[in-house]
Structure formats: C-alpha cells, structure tokens
Amino acid sequence: MKLEMREQMRLEQRMKLAPRMIQSMEILQLPMLALEERIEQELNSNPVLETEGPSKPEEEPSSGELSQADIDTERLEDFGRIERLDEDYKDWMDRSETFRYRPRTDEPDLKLEAIKNTAAPPQSLHEHLSDQWRLVEADDQVKKAGTTIIDYINDRGYLTVRLEHLHNKDRADFTFDDLKKALKLIQSLEPAGVGAQNLKECLLIQIAQSSDNMSFETKLIAEHMNELIENRLPEIARKMNCRIEKINQAIERMSKFDTSPGLQISKDQNHPITADVIVERIEDSADFSVRLADSNLPSLRINDYYAKMTKESGLNAKTKKFLQNNIRSAKWIIDAIEQRKNTLLKVASAVVKFQREFFDNGQLYLKPLPMSKVADEIGVHLATVSRAVAGKYIQCSWGILPLRKFFSGGTEDAHGTELSWEAIRAKLQQIIDNEDKSKPLSDDQIRKKLAEAGIKNLARRTVAKYRKLLNIPSARFRKKY
C-alpha cells in the first residue's frame, strides 16, 4: 500500500446562510412573549432604533423651547464631545480632587424603585421547612438530626432515604433515637403530610392532624392500603365486615388530602401562554377572520436624525461606521418582524382553510394535515412552516390551542371521511366518558365501539397506547362500586 500526497482541484456548491437569513429564521420561531423580549433588547442595544409614537401636528416653538435645528446642532456637538472624551478625561482627572458622589434627595432612585417593584423569588420547600425547624424547641442533637433529615426531603415532601442510612456510627452528632424524634417533629410541620416515607404514611399523618373523627379511614389505610390502590373494594368490605358504600364514603372524605404535600410550597413555575393568532367567526357570516395578536408589539422605525447624520460630509469616519452598522441591524430586525407577521398569517389562514370543519364543529372533526400541504399552499419551504408553528398558539372558540396540533397524520373511517389521530383520541375519550362505570369497557371493547363508529382497523394495543396518552387508567381502576 502506497501513501502519497497530491494536489487536486474540486468544484462544489455549498449553501451558506447570511446573517440576515439566520436572524429571520430566529425571529420566525419566537412566540409572542419571547418576541416582545427580543424587541426590548434591540431597543436597549441599538441607539438608532426607536418606537413610533403618536403623531402630533407641528407647532412653532414657543419662547424658551429649542427648534429642531438647535436640537440637531446640540446632537452634533454631543458626538464631538464623545470623540474628545478620551483626551479630556486624563487632563480632568489630573486637575480634579477626589470626587465624592452626593445623591440628590429630590430625584427618585430608579434602581431602588425597580428593586421595590420586583417580586420576591419563590421560597423552596427546603427553606420553608428550615425556617419552621429553627423555631422548634428540642435538644441540640435532635436539632442536628432534623437538619440532616430536611436535606433529604424532595420537592413532593417525601423523605427519600431510610433513617438507618442517615445514622453514622462513627460520628457522635446524633443517635438513631434522635433521628426518630426529629422525624416525628418534622412530620408535625406545615404542610401536613411532609416528611412521610411513602404514600401510606403521608395519608396517616394527614388523618392524624385532621380535626374530624376518621378512625375508620385510619384502619382502612393502615390495614388495606394495597387493596385500596388496586381498587379491590369488595375484598376490603369482606375483610372489614362493612358495606362498600361505607368505603366509598371514606374515599370521598380522604380525597381532600394531598398526596404530594411538598408541591404546595415548591410549585413548578408555569410559563404563561399567549395566543399568537386569533380566529373569530365574522358576524352574520359563515366565514372566519384570521388576525395576529400583535397589538402589544411596538412599531419600530429608524431615527430620522441618525439616518441623516450618516450623510453628513464632516462626520468622523468611526462615528459614521458605527451609525451605519446600527442602521443596517435595525433594518434587519424590522424586516424580520414584518416577514414573521406575513408568514404566520399565511400559515394560520391556510390552517383555517383546511381545518374548516374543526372550527365549525370541534375536535372530532380534525382532519389529517401534513405541513407539506400548507407549504405548497402558501409557496414556502416545509422548514419555514415548521418554524412558523413552533411554540405558537391559536385562539378560537374551542380555546387556546397549539398551532402544531392541527398538523398530524390520520386514517379514513368506513365512510371515507378523513380523521386525524387527534380526532380518534377525542372519540376514544368520548366513549370512556359515556361508559357505565360499574362495568367499564376493556381495551378490546373500546376497539369494537370505535369500529361501530366507523373507525376500523385499529389494534387493541393502539387503543391501549392512546388511552395511556390521555392518562386514562385501565378498566379495573375505572370501576366504581
């Protein structure tokens, strides 16, 4: 085998994305709230970009007011002072004495006002328990043991390790008995049920702290928790020598208890959802209007003075280049936002056109709609449609829904009508909602019901998969006695 190096010429084509195109794609993908934040960032970083204010009739400047010519002259002098700043700064520092800042009492402190108006960060469950634990009166060893236990309580409020694992025999900080005493005290803290090691203990703690007489519920949980989880109520009734109605009443009373008490404190932050598109039926008409929910977006423009300033012959080259770069960047962001509006409106209008039956009758009439069909309709690339619907929401009479929801595959029913997988899942949900809960339907029976409705050729495992996607338990757990 011979190895050698050779020079070779090769002609090939490569597609390189220009910065303007990359920015347009990024803007297109942004949902409404993110776009508002991006515009705010651009306004803060680009001095030539500004929002359009309400237009006012031109008035003659009164005495004491500056004319536009005077303002332009002052602006030009400001740029001159900025250019001379480096030279003047050293001379001024050499001549000046130690400078001490004295705040003016008549002017508000903007930073302080912003801090006062900022919401406090949410308190974690660990902080909430630690604050309560500091007020508990106990021996030092018990207090140390409790601090260790709190470190191992998860966000749901459960102790994630066994007490035996927290006891270190080589250290004399606390004993195993101190751990047990500390855990007992922690389980008396708020929220009720915190510090439990399992669901059974969590419910028993909350029952013990309840002011109602729940002795039957205590026995039910303590002795028959496994049967209760598996919904074997007749077996429990036989063992406890009681009627099933009494067990159902106990379950109803226990439904007020929280199986994840820690989440009352350490709740996950829910991100707000804002509609990007609004679809409304036109009054006295069968048609729909499609518009963008962009009323909160500011109208952007380039500052006229800075645009004229770049054409001044006596302008410093460094300043001129700075302004030209910022003007170019401002034009890009304005064009990208305008392109996003046009593309999103076209995509939404095409969705309303192809999913007309959904907007008229609801989710059962959702049809299969590939993105390529919408891309061909509006004359753009498939990737453009994918970016346009990413993270966007549409508001209509059926609620605020993800725009991507309208794009899915599907099948045909016995009558030749196209149904999306979303519509089939909605039909499955409808069948289960209308079933007799004393005799819930099995997956195979649901499949037969769907076949009777015209949705054939669905396997039982497909029905089971859709049921799990909808968070619907199996027939045994849906049974009501």
Image (cartoon, grey):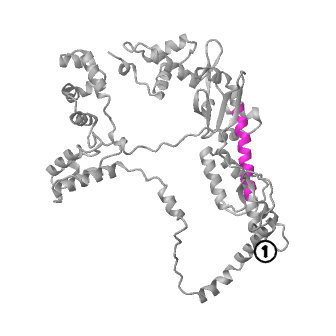
Task: Decide whether residue 381 is among the magenta residues.
Answer: no
Q: Residue at x 23, y 49 (%)?
A: 165
Please state the extent of the stretch shown in magenta in the rendering: 329-349
Task: Check disc 1 and give the amino acid type.
Answer: Asn
Up/down of 50 relative to 261, above or below:
below
Q: Secondary structure at mark 1?
A: loop
Name the spot of residue 355 as percent of width and height, x first: 67, 25
Percent coordinates x, y for residue 140 in the rendering: 17, 58
Question: Which residue in the structure is indicated by mark 1?
Answer: 316
Where does the image place residue 232, in percent across and percent down from the top left?
A: 28, 20
Of 457 and 152, the residue lying toward us: 152
Q: x and y percent of residue 110 in the render?
A: 54, 63
Q: Residue at x 66, y 57 (%)?
A: 43
Indicate the quadrant containing the N terminus: top left, top right, bottom left or bottom right: bottom right
Can you see residue 169?
no
Instruction: Please check the rendered image and state whether residue 345 is part of the magenta-colored stretch, yes or no.
Output: yes
| Outermost front residue | 63
| Residue 139 vs residue 141, the one in the foreground | 139
The answer to whether residue 451 is above or below residue 468 is above
Asked whether 328 or 416 is in front, the reply is 328
- How would you rate the neighbour count of disc 1 (Cα within 10 Å): few for under 14, some for 14-19, many for 20 or more? some
Look at the image and tell me whether residue 171 can be seen: yes
What residue is rendered at 32% in x and 35% in y? 259
- The residue depicted at 61 percent of the width and 33 percent of the height is 395
